[in-house]
Structure formats: structure tokens, C-alpha cells
Image (cartoon, rainbow, N blue to C red):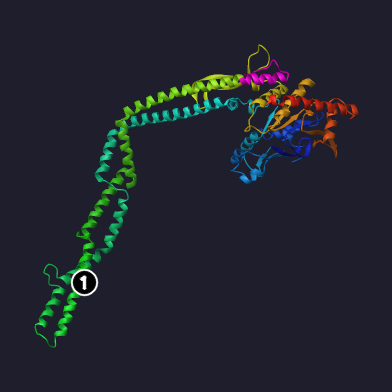
Amino acid sequence: MLTSLFVSDLALIRRLSVDFHRGFSVLTGETGAGKSLVLDSLGLFLSPKAGKELVRHGEEKLEVSLFFTELTEEQIADLAEFVSSEEAREGVTLTRIVYASGKNLSKLCGRTLPFSRLSALAAQLLAIHGQNSAVGLLDEKNHRRYLDDALSPEGQKALAEYKAAYTRHLDAKKALDKLRADVAEGKEKLALYEYQMQEIARVKPKKGEEDKLEEKLCHLQNFEKEYGAVATAHRALSGGEKGKGAVFLLSAAARKLEELGEGAHADTAARLYELAESAKELESDLSAALSDYGEEDPGDLMDRIRKRLDTLYRLKQKFGMTVDELLDYYEQIKEKKDLTLRGKDDIKKGELALKKLSEDLVLAAENLTRARRETAERLESEIHGTLAFLDMPKMRFSVLLTPEQTPGADGAEKVAFGIAANVGEGTKPLAQVASGGEMSRIMLALSLKLLKEKDAPTMVFDEIDTGISGATAQKIGICLRALARERQIFCVTHSAQVATLADHHLLVAKSESEGRTETTLTLLDAEGSQRETARLLGGRELSDEARLAADKLRSEGLAEYEKLKDRLT
């Protein structure tokens, strides 16, 4: 809700700061006091027009700030770019600054942002109904949503079923269109696909193969020298093909000394036998090491690896892809080839499925249209009753359902609200109703029946009592008070009957200070409200008779409200 308003240097307003409350508030004051200026200050947040002529004479700029609290979670989420959720839950300040030079600034909680973003937020929080008002209920693009919000539970189910059917139909149509395009493309490129698949299949690349080959090649290059040394050492011990290496020679030397028998060289022969056994063990170890390197010569193996890497490189160059990309591409063109070959059958299946979904969509659209017609008839009757209560019995509200050529995302018909001001006259769009006061009363009647929690929680009505009787004014006050049960309502009024039904009374007054005229806005206490009501009734002095008349008017109005409040919302 709108918790406070701050205005500085806007026309006759030098400085104004006032707190607001829940419920129904009225603004009254003598003609020319500046009630329209208060509305202008609010309107700055809904319209990009911010003329420099509004800046108080002699001042550099005007500034208006609105402080809103109790934002919804959805509104808080929309502000995440500018304000933290913790800060937004405490309340947000919207500010508009207009300089005498024509420059203007928009701010949210002190942070500058585009006016379009500020006004979009303001429109969620505040609605002004009066002459030339063209927001919310007047905007035809919102009418379908208002009608759907009023659907019965069965109607809501029909709406959900339609949206689900539309999504299924849309997805199936997109899939079929893509299938047809892919099959057509595949027919043109089938020979190319087959050739490319053969080229890739001939090489048989494997995922990660290049890295493994490069790693192995690097390893082979490093141990080629090592392999040669191990092989040479093994030949020295084993003797190679002739078998007369170190092992053989040590054993032979030991045998020769052993032939001498027991004597001076027996210990040497024993030691030679030990050396021969050690050499034999070393030969065995080196033999095992050579087996680990494989039977193939490392040089031959490196040649084969280089040849394989070269083959992979040529394939990559040909296609302009990495090995992993080639494998993915192979699967893609294989799928396209398979799709092309079976395309005719798949298209036929898709067409049959789409036909069934189209029939389901038409049936869902018919159910939704039926639910909307029933709801439209109910709303027309209820709103006509409210208009008649507001002494506009000849005015007819209509919900116009115009069939679309094809069902769309929101149904099979356009929805528009219209008004026939007199018997025998044609229905016109809401925005073409000429009288500002008449428009406000129509908006009041619609608001009582159509507004939901997601609509602007703060509403301002202007000129709603223009050219009406006291009895009608009381009815308007009753309706405004009823509407204020669910949202914060402000009304600029000249009517005592409306004013006495308010929860809060604000006085707009004009005075002179230091040779300048100033407009002020003051929240009245009970005595102040009584005095202002007496003035609205036509008395300048707060006599006992005027006080009694004001009190009587309020008690009668509140009594009537208690009788009617539950019928009006």
C-alpha cells in the first residue's frame, strides 16, 4: 500500500509530507485549492509526460517520492535487479525528479533507472481512475485476463485444459515442421551423407585416440635409448644367438679350475660359480624387461603411430573438425540419413498425431468459449446491477467475444469490454466514454466485480461525484468503502455524502506565506472532518445544526453500508 507521499516545489506545493493508512481515504478542499496537484504528483509515476511547467516558479526542480510497503513476492522478485529482497520487504521508495530545464530522473530506493521500469512497477502498485484515464480496466489487452479471473472453478479447469492442449498442439506442429524440413534437406544431401560416413568409417577414429597415441609416441621416443641399452646388456650376459656371453664364460672358467681338484684354486672356482649364478639372474631380469617393451621393435612401433596420426590429421583437415567432433558429426549425419530413409512414414505418423491434437484443441477451445460466455453473461448482469445501484440504470456493460480465425495461445476469441450509454445506442469501447465522472463510476462498478489480489492494491478515483445527486453520492461512497475492504482507496470528492463514509479525511488547502501561495495536505481528526463535512454541506460556520447534520449523514451512510456491503463485492 501507499504509506507516504513527499512532494517539493510542484506548482503551488512548496513542501508536502503526509502519511497514509489502510482503507478508504477522501481528499476534499475548496475549488482551486490544489486537489488536482496532488493527483498530478501521483500521475508523474504513470505517465512519461513530466512538463517543466510543473516546477514551482523560481525553483530549480520538483521532486515527488512515494513509499510503498507490503509488496507481493512477485513484485519483490521483479525488483531483484535493483533492490535486495530484504530491503523490498521493508518497503520501496519511488522518486521522480523534474528540472526546470526539462531534464528528469527516475529512481527506485535512490538508484537511477529507466522511467519505463519505474512506471511498470508503479502500475502494479497504483491505479488512477478519472478523466482520460487509460490504464488497467480500460486497456483492452487486459480484458481477457479479467474475464478469465472471474471464471468458475469449472471454467478455470477448462482454461487449464485448453492451455495444455494448445501447448501439445504447438509442440507437435513445430516437431512436424522440423521433420519435414529435415527430410527435405536429407533428400538433397543423402549422397553426401553416405560419402562422408564412408570416409569416416574407413579411418575408424576413436574418442580420445589422438591423445593416447601422442602420449605413447612421446614415451617411445624417451625409452628407445633405454631399450637399446637393456638389449645390449642382455646380449652381453646371454651371448645372443651364439649363447657365449658372460654367463657362459663365467661357468666355463669355474669348470676349468674345478678340474684341478682340491687345492689352491678351489675358492676361486666357487666364487666364479656364484658370479655365474648372479649373472644368470640378471640375464633373466633383463629378459623380462625386454618382454615388457613388447616383441615389436620400438622404432617400427613409432613409425606405425606416426602413420596413424597422419591419417587422423588428414581426416580432420578434410572435415575441419576434431576427432571428437567427427564422431559426433558421424552420428548426426547417420541419424539424418536414417530419418530421410524413413521420413515418409514418420511424416505420415506426425500428420495423423497433429490431426488428433487439432481436434482435441478445437474441443478444448469450445469448452473454454462456453465457460467464457457463461461468465460474461454473469458479469454483465452483476455489473449492470451495480451500475443501476449507482443510478446509471440505462447504461449497459457488455463483454464482447469475437471469434479468431484460428485458436491462439489464449483461446479462440478476442475479449473486449464495452459500454452502451443509453438505450438503443451501440456498444463502445470503455476508453471512449466521454465524461470523466461517468468513467470513474463505471470503473468503480467494474472494480467491485473484477479486481483481484494481483491488481493494483492502491486506487485513486477522481471526479466520481460530478453532476450527481446526494443520494447517488452516498451510493458511491458505500461502493468505495466496500472496495476498500480489499485494497487502499483514495477519492477526490466535493460530496459530503462520499466524505462521511471514509475511514480517513485529508484536507487540501491553499494559503499565503511570505508572499507566495502554497497548497497543503493535512490529515484531519474527527473534529476537523466534521467541520469540513459541514462546509461541503454548504455551511461556513460549524454551528450545532451543521455538526448534527454531518453526524447524521455519516451515521445514515454507515448504516446503509452495513446493509449492502456483502452484496457489492
**Figure check: 378 above or below 71:** above
Question: How many numbered dots are placed on residues in this image?
Answer: 1
Q: Where is residue 270 in the image (x, y as percent from the top left)?
A: 16, 81
558 or 231, nearer to the observer: 558
Establish if 535 lies above or below 102.
above
Q: Can residue 391 be seen in the rendering of this structure?
A: yes
The one of 256 and 150 positioned closer to us in this rendering: 150
Quarter holding the N terminus is: top right
In-front residue for pair 128/155? 155
* The residue stretch that appears in magenta: 378-399
Give the residue at the far front of this rendering.
563
Residue 293 locus on image (x, y percent)? 23, 62
- Say which residue label 1 marks: 282
Relative image position of residue 44 (x, y in whole percent)? 69, 34
Type of amino acid at the residue the image marks with label 1: Leu
Residue 381 highlighted magenta (yes or no): yes
| Residue 357 placement: quadrant | top left
Q: Which residue is drawn at 28% across and 57% down?
A: 216
Image quadrant assignment for residue 561: top right
Q: Pick out the residue farthest to the left.
A: 259
State which quadrant residue 347 falls in. Answer: top left
* In-image side of 439 versus 141 (left or right): right
The image position of residue 182, as x and y in percent, is: 35, 32
Which residue corresponds to the image point at 40% horizontal and 25% vertical from the top-left? Answer: 354
Of residues 170 and 430, which is closer to you in this image?
A: 170
Whether 136 is among the magenta residues is: no
Q: Judge left or right: residue 60 versus residue 297.
A: right
Q: In which quarter of the image is the C terminus?
A: top right
Q: Can residue 51 be seen in this view?
A: no
Secondary structure found at label 1: helix
